[in-house]
């Protein structure tokens, strides 16, 4: 009987591969809370383009923290939605689930927090336009958030837990004013480190670090961790290990072709693995061959095209011209000078579209003065799209 696919494009991986350095670092920060009952240090910010494994690593950290006795609260930001109100709801739910606070304390704390964090006009303020001076975050909201985090973290510790772990995903989509409130509250809590057994770990697109540094002067003290594509050994493991677990293997040639298609991108590795699997419908003991990878590649073409299309459509006209010039070059890594020449502009004149495309994770630096697409296959898609 055919076995269902062990690959997980767009979902948490069944087997989390690699990220050893990052996992060690995140583990050390959690250990600090466990051992000393104090703040884990400045906020952690995982940053990378889409599909590189930020959410997967954040969820892995949440699992490990729970095993260490943390109570964890998860927030996923979305453009136009308030973050702090959701944070308060999520922390409250976590405490209810963990059975930490008695009803009266919980309601007491939440009443103040609800009032102060939910000050009208704060939660719904939009993004800051480049060059705008950020308004100072309102002191009452900072104090409210600070009190909530302190009270809840300390109560968890009092009841024998390790502390509170707050995880915020898609942080780049957080309302700007709320980000300032959060960073200020964390900074104040750091001043009384020993009283606050808690950690804040976040993830977002490459624009996130700059956004944090603009939201608060001390934002630069956050711990920024960039995620890269997988190197060859780890990429092999992403394809091989989930298959091996259900007694299916790859021929050497098939693995080679699949690795070339995905080029170390975690999402594409899962996608090519999954598509090959669907094409082959393997039974236990079977080997995935080159033909199956070829059929798989055709199966995944629609998905890949939709992703390229979405990235292309999100770009302005000037940005599209920039992307077109990159695609024209024909090789994966494109010298910046070449893009300027193709666009018939001075190098300086293309720095704005370049920065915006990097911020949104559509392209990335690949060595000094060189760029590449973050999604393998995007250059081909653009050439086809513009040619036909
Ligand atoms: N460490 C990993 N090992 C195996 N697969 C991974 C790993 N990290 C991410 N993936 C896979 O890559 C894809 C994107 O992961 P995700 O965490 O959603 O990325 P992001 O949050 O950066 O967009 C998912 O299909 C996931 O299964
Ligand atoms: Mg994600």
Image: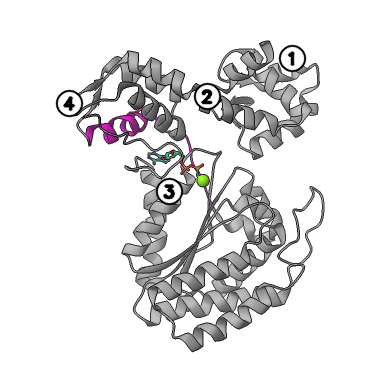
Residue pictured at 47% horizontal, 85% vertical: 103
Q: Are marks 3 and 4 in contact (CB under 8 Å)?
A: no
Residue beneath disc 4: 285
Residue beneath disc 3: 57
Q: Quadrant of residue 289?
A: top left
Query: From mark 1 to mark 2, how far is it between C-alphas?
Result: 29 Å
Disc 1 or 3, which lies upstream in sequence?
Answer: 3
Furthest-top residue in this view: 387
**Circle 3 Cα neighbour tier, 10 Å, few/some/many (<14 / 14–19 / ≥20):** many
Query: In the image, residue 218 lies at what x, y percent?
Result: 65, 61
Cβ at disc 3 under 8 Å from ligand 1: yes
Mark 4 vs mark 1: in front: 4
Q: In which quadrant of the rendered image does the N terminus lie?
A: top left
Residue 236 located within the stretch drawn in magenta: yes
Q: Is residue 97 left or right of residue 352?
A: left
Q: Quadrant of ligand 1?
A: top left
Disc 3 or 4, which lies upstream in sequence?
Answer: 3
The residue stretch that appears in magenta: 224-245
Mark 2 vs mark 3: in front: 2
Residue beneath disc 2: 302
Query: In the image, residue 310 lies at what x, y percent?
Result: 63, 32
Instruction: Work out whether residue 271 can be spotted.
Output: yes
Mark 3 vs mark 4: in front: 4
Query: In the image, residue 163 lies at what x, y percent?
Result: 41, 72
Residue beneath disc 1: 342
Query: From mark 2 to mark 3, how far is it between C-alphas?
Result: 27 Å
Instruction: Work out whether residue 373 can be spotted.
Output: no
Cβ at disc 1 under 8 Å from ligand 1: no
Foreground: 269 or 220?
Answer: 269
Query: From mark 3 to mark 4, how far is it between C-alphas?
Result: 31 Å
Disc 4 or 1, which lies upstream in sequence?
Answer: 4
Q: Is residue 178 left or right of residue 36?
A: right
């Amino acid at each position: 009987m055919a076995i269902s696919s062990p690959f997980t494009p767009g979902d948490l991986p069944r087997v989390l591969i690699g990220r050893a350095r990052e996992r060690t670092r995140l583990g050390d920060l959690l250990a600090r809370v466990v051992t000393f009952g104090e703040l884990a240090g400045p906020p952690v910010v995982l940053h990378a383009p889409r599909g590189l494994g930020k959410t997967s690593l954040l969820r892995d950290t949440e699992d490990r923290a729970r095993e260490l006795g943390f109570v964890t609260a998860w927030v996923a930001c979305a453009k136009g939605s308030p973050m702090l109100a959701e944070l308060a709801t999520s922390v409250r739910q976590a405490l209810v689930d963990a059975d930490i606070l008695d009803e009266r304390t919980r309601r007491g704390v939440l009443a103040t927090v609800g009032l102060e964090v939910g000050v009208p006009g704060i939660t719904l303020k939009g993004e800051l336009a480049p060059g705008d001076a950020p308004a100072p975050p309102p002191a009452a909201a900072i104090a409210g958030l600070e009190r909530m985090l302190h009270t809840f973290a300390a109560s968890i510790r009092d009841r024998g837990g390790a502390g509170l772990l707050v995880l915020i995903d898609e942080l780049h989509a957080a309302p700007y004013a709320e980000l300032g409130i959060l960073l200020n509250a964390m900074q104040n809590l750091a001043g009384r480190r020993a009283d606050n057994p808690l950690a804040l770990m976040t993830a977002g697109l490459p624009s996130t670090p700059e956004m944090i540094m603009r939201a608060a002067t001390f934002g630069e003290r956050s711990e920024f961790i960039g995620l890269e594509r997988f190197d060859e050994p780890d990429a092999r493991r992403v394809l091989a290990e989930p298959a091996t677990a259900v007694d299916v293997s790859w021929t050497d040639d098939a693995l080679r072709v699949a690795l070339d298609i995905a080029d170390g991108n975690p999402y594409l590795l899962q996608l090519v693995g999954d598509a090959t699997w669907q094409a082959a419908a393997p039974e236990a003991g079977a080997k995935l061959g080159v033909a199956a990878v070829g059929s798989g590649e055709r199966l995944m073409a629609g998905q890949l095209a939709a992703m390229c299309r979405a990235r292309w459509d999100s770009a302005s006209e000037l940005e599209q011209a920039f992307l077109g010039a990159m695609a024209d070059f024909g090789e994966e890594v494109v010298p910046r000078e070449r893009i300027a020449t193709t666009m018939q502009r001075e190098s300086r004149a293309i720095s704005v579209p370049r920065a915006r495309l990097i911020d949104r994770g559509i392209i990335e630096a690949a060595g000094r003065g060189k760029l590449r697409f973050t999604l393998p296959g995007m250059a081909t898609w653009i050439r086809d799209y513009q040619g036909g």
